[in-house]
Image: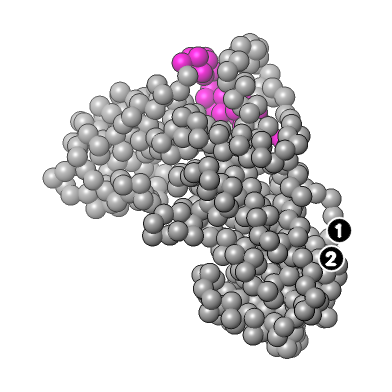
Amino acid sequence: MLQLPSTYSDLEKYTEDLCSLIDTPLVRQITGGIHVNDALIHNAWDGLPAEWTEWWSRWPDHRLAQQDLIDRIDEDGLGDDVGSDAAVGEILRTRPKSLRSWLAQLKALALTRTQRPGPTVTLPEILETRMKTKKIAEVARATRLIRDVCESRRIRRVVDMGSGQGYLSISLAHLFPDLQVLAIDGSASQITGSQSFADSLGIPHSRLTHMVHWIDGSSALADKVADWAAGDGCILVGLHACGNLSEHMIRYFATMPSLDALAVVGCCYNHIVPRSESCPEGFPISAALRSRNVTLSPTALMTGCQAPNNWPRPDPHASSVFGRRRLYRAMLEKAFHDHGIRLPGGDGSERPAWGTRKGDMASFTAFAHRAMDCLGVDTAQRPADEQLRAYEDEYKDWEGRIAILWTLSVLCCKVVESVIAVDRYRYLAEQQDVQDVDVVPVFDVKVSPRNLMIVATKKRRQNCNV
């Protein structure tokens, strides 16, 4: 059963309100309708409510205004803690009611990320030495949860799709000798490394089988997994299954008789492929969200990957080039637009990127020259230095505006991720053979921001060997 936000008791009402929010003009604008890099071209600042922009103009430091916005969606319910300055305190007391209401709506519609209590296993040092602290915590909790599902369903076979370096699959095979594990990944080098480490631990191939295969939703992979399962029931698992990989796994679980349980944590939502004529199986996958014509732009999907409540709080006494870099990027797009310079990404596809060096931030002219060199802009098309300096003069006071526009987009991260999680939950709930579905905040969100695990089991079958 999906744990709904505290103000909801009905899944249909929650789904409707969630989908309605992401379809509002404001959310559409800040999550891709006007990309923050195009903010100067389309004057995105004026597209925001006037009382909001006037209020933000009063802040002495835009970074404090950004932090105030981020604090408003924190599940821990932080108070007005962006500084003790009396002037800031007065500004906080005059926050527009409409802004307060909108921020409260974002918070109220987000699925909880507070870790659900549950046991973990203590990983032996020989396993921990390969992992960073974050991965140790994830594997320690995930292996225990997966083991508990296996015991409750009498499952002895585990299929780990997108197994990567084998952190999860090797840990399961090493800790629980009664389990047989199939580790599948599309990277031959990852599989080779995982197999090598498993061999060093003395794990026999009969208990940990490795397979190189792209997880692409194909029947060919389904047939190979079914052959390996040999009629036994399996649990399908994935630890941070990237993009559409999670959706492929969910469909495999729904359609393959040998898969009796599912436990998958998604990530990298920017790699999700939206539904289209060329990809009819794309997002959303549930009938519930398809009937509502739900769409998420590439920018919105990228927003879902953010975790602003985990970011360091700003130090008002220290300088930062982050806001200036954002401004310069928007100014560059404006210059390209004004001078008819067309680059890849203008049609909404992935935009070009390049690395900036410390000296590139000395001025917009230096930044623009570096960018045009990296992007191969023809010399004859390039704006003159005098023209570039004119952009810097015109937009010198826009750093805070661009920073706040970008922050507004990021604030939608939790509702975007909630939409994705609800879509996957509802797709599974729509399947006739699925018995139970849950969305479990399985990790400490302060350590692992992508902590929502889809857990599902099927109805018992008389002919199933579990």
Q: Are the residues tagged 1 and 2 within 8 Å (C-beta)?
A: yes
Q: Which residue sits furthest left? A: 380
Give, as a three-letter code, the residue at label 1.
Pro
Relative vertical location of residue 157 with respect to residue 250 in this rendering, above or below: below
Write down the quadrant of residue 342 in the picture. Answer: top left
Determine if residue 206 is in view.
yes
Give the residue pinned by disc 2: 148
| Coordinates of residue 63 in the picture (x, y in percent) | 55, 28
Residue shown at 65% from the left, 67% from the top: 253
Magenta span has 161? Answer: no
Which dot, 1 or 2, sits closer to the camera? 2
Residue 59 magenta-drawn?
yes
Comparing 237 with 154, the one in front is 154
Residue beneath the point at 55% across and 34% down = 20
Q: Is residue 175 left or right of residue 130?
A: right
Q: Residue at x 56, y 46 (%)?
A: 289
> In this view of the protein, which residue sits in the foreground, 371 or 80?
80
**Nearest the camera: 181 or 9?**
9
- Residue at horizontal 57%, vertical 38%? 19
Residue 257 screen position, x and y as percent: 68, 74
Q: Is residue 12 left or right of residue 334?
A: right
Q: Quadrant of residue 466?
A: bottom right
Q: Is residue 193 left or right of residue 370?
A: right
Q: Position of residue 6 (x, y in %)?
A: 76, 34
The residues colored magenta run 50-75
**How far apart in space, not on screen, are marks 1 and 2 (Cα)?**
10 Å
Q: Name the residue under label 1.
A: 119
> Could you tell me which secondary element the residue under label 2 belongs to?
helix
| Magenta-colored segment: predominant secondary structure | helix
Given the image, on which type of amino acid does mark 2 rest? Asp
